[in-house]
Amino acid sequence: MIMTDMRDTETGTLEQRELYSQDIWAKGETAAAILSPQSTEELSDIVKTANARGLSINPRGGGMSYTKGYIPENGTTAILDFSGMNRIIEINEEDMYVTVQAGCTWKTLYEALGEKGLRTPFWGPLSGISSTIGGGLSQNNAFFGGSLYDTSTASALSVTVVLADGTIVKTGTGGTKNAKPFYRHFGPDLTGLFMGDTGALGYKTEATLRLIPVPEHEDWASFECDSHAGWITALKEMGRLGLACELFGFDPNLQRVRMERAGLAADIRTLGNVITKQKSGLVRGLKEGARVAMAGRGFMDATAYSLHIVVEGHSSAEVGAKMTTLKTVAHRFEAREIENSIPKIIRANPFTPLNNILGPRGERWVPIHGIVAMSDALTCFEGIHELFNTMQGEFDSHGVTPGFLTTILGTTGYLIEPVFIWPEEIWPIHKVTVDPGTLRRATTFDKNPDATAVVLKARRGILDIFTAHGAAHFQIGRTYPYRETRDDNTWKLIRGIKSLLDPERRVNPGSLGL
């Protein structure tokens, strides 16, 4: 039973409360209750009742945190489940905005808008089949559209927020009398206050995002580099131009893992989507599907670094000109062009089941990331690479496989995401997220605290390197050093805002270092 009326703080089975109290990386104290409202007004009432009971409330979106973003720190914390607030409230085609409840997933929104030929500029993370709009605005997102339009929060115009005392506030022109939520900037940017706050300042219940027409044309390209220096620098130089909607890359280790993950059935489904999702028609779709089929999985050098480009526009001439420029940059850094299957497949299948929260044999998986300035990308990567070299013996002894994903955010942010795969038992959150067929094929691993300790050591070392390079982080949660890296006056301001909005520290206490 899911508690909505607060009559019993032990409502929700132990199994449910334990599930909602863990994320991909860590387990917290078991939540006292699970709260599942259906509307902003119902959530406001729940918050008021929770206050009277002395409960804190941690908001949980799709549950894909790996930074202890919502897990309880004590047994007097309830989990706020947004799965019941998943409606698209309004698609305003004339004024070019969409309003959704916070629990709506990126996949649901993308598909509904696509039927009308519309899209949000940033349109989802790779986990968009489960990740929610509210979670994405609280934690920030990278990927689809991110290299051109920046992060998820850059597409937000207005939010409706329930504060710690149950007060309902609206931001942007959504908070203007007799106005629509069509614009973000009118006085102080209160929308920005609740962006990337890790759910620590209030409970976002509705969000309005701007819309653009879906570009009619797109193209893809992939390259290989023999050195990490060429790989990092080529991505950086292409990103600075602001031409590609997605720019991303994999190191050889992560590339091998990706090639191992899917089987023949997945390949067949992929071909179908490549064929049917070509906006330029069936003939091109058949050609692209044939190219993917002929390339198979043997077109990539197992020791090379890969980088991938997606370009879109409203004419084939626009797309062609952008791609020509980007390819010229890639060739300047001795990148070899290869079959473009990876970006083509990812675009045709943007929101796949989240089987990649396990390794290819069923191992545990966890990432960690940082966003650095373009000029710091190479030295930061090399610092992490050197850390991995010093730990290689430990990795080998405990079966830990490290890897890297990189992507560009706007023209200023270079995201570096180390990932780890290692033999360790899986938890209920993995079992309810991964599809049953994948679970049946997975190897069952026993508890392996020694291997997990190696991963923890590596993560801590990476955080030190990111901090030394002045990195920013998404989904700060209880992992990334936010408080420690603020100057005194900035932290005093942030703490003052928290004290004004949540003086009793009831809203996701501990997150953001508050």
Image (spheres, rainbow, N blue to C red):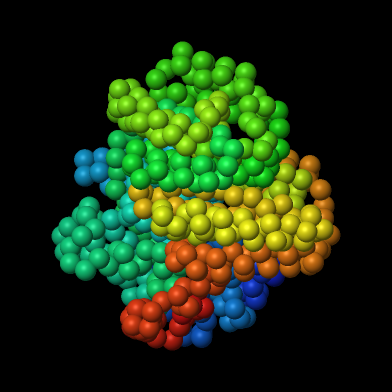
Q: Which residue is located at x 57 percent, y 60 percent?
A: 383
Q: Is residue 120 visible?
A: no
| Figure check: 429 above or below 442 | below
**Among the 4 quarters of the image, the one containing residue 321:** top left
| Figure check: 35 above or below 397 | below
Q: Which residue is located at x 65 percent, y 24 percent?
A: 296
Q: Position of residue 16 (x, y in %)?
A: 66, 65
Q: Position of residue 212 (x, y in %)?
A: 29, 40
**Among the 4 quarters of the image, the one containing residue 166:** bottom left
Foreground pick, 290 / 305: 305
Q: Position of residue 177 (x, y in %)?
A: 16, 64
| Figure check: 280 above or below 427 | above
Foreground pick, 149 / 123: 149
Give the tally of numbered discs.
0
Q: Which residue is located at x 77 percent, y 61 percent?
A: 394
Most distant residue in the left direction: 178
Location of the N terminus (image quadrant): bottom right
> Is residue 382 found left or right of 211 in the rendered image?
right
Q: Which residue is located at x 35 percent, y 31 percent?
A: 325
Q: Is residue 274 visible?
A: yes
Q: Position of residue 462 (x, y in %)?
A: 59, 64
Most distant residue in the top direction: 283
| Figure check: 484 above or below 315 | below
